[in-house]
């Protein structure tokens, strides 16, 4: 369908294969984040950690939307999160 990309084309679901699951949405700026779609996903899959990766999300912070926590971090923070989880699993 032409037009605006769907939520699925802009967001990704990742598994670190360490029993942690992430739903990741990428934004140029944390101010551009609209929580509607990610929160719908979070209500459907409550075991997933909801993450927004944005260039201006430094230092890392969290926000609550209708009782659901969303973590904001930059790309380096996301890479560090994966490295820490892999190190903890080994």
Image (tube, rainbow, N blue to C red):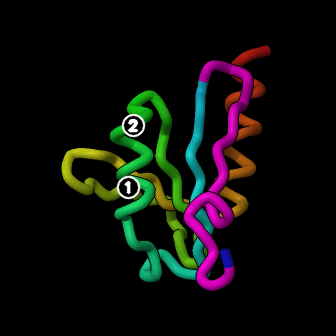
Q: Which residue is drawn at 46% across and 81% down?
A: 32
Q: Residue 8 magenta-drawn?
A: yes
Q: Name the residue under label 1.
A: 62
**What range of the chain is rendered magenta?**
2-19
In the displayed structure, does residue 42 sit left or right of residue 49? Answer: left
Can you name the residue that lies furthest to the left here? 66
Can you name the residue that lies furthest to the front here? 1
Q: Quadrant of the N terminus?
A: bottom right
Q: Residue 81: x and y, percent?
A: 66, 42
Q: In which quarter of the image is residue 11?
A: bottom right
In the displayed structure, does residue 1 sit left or right of residue 48? Answer: right
Q: Mark 2 points at which residue?
A: 44
Q: Residue at x 69, y 20 (%)?
A: 18
As helix, strand or loop, the secondary structure at mark 1 comes to strand
Question: What is the distance, in whole Å, between disc 1 and disc 2 at their CAs?
Answer: 20 Å
Binning the other alpha carbons within 10 Å of mark 1 as few (below 14), some (14 to 19) or many (20 upward) gives some
Q: Earlier in the sequence, mark 1 or mark 2?
A: 2
Q: Residue 7: x and y, percent?
A: 56, 64
Q: Residue 70: x and y, percent?
A: 40, 52
Q: Residue 86: x and y, percent?
A: 76, 27
Q: Quadrant of residue 42?
A: top left
* Closer to the camera in the image, 21 or 63: 21
Q: Residue at x 47, y 75 (%)?
A: 30
Q: Residue 27 magenta-drawn?
A: no
In the displayed structure, does residue 41 sit left or right of residue 74? Answer: left
As helix, strand or loop, the secondary structure at mark 2 comes to helix
């Amino acid at each position: 369908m032409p037009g605006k990309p769907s939520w699925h084309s802009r967001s990704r679901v990742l598994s670190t294969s360490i029993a942690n699951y992430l739903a990741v949405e990428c934004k140029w700026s944390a101010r551009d984040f609209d929580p509607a779609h990610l929160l719908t996903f979070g209500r459907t899959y409550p075991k997933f950690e909801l993450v927004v990766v944005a260039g201006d999300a430094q230092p890392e912070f969290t926000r609550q939307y209708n009782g659901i926590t969303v973590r904001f971090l930059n790309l380096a923070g996301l890479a560090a999160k994966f490295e820490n989880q892999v190190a903890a699993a080994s």
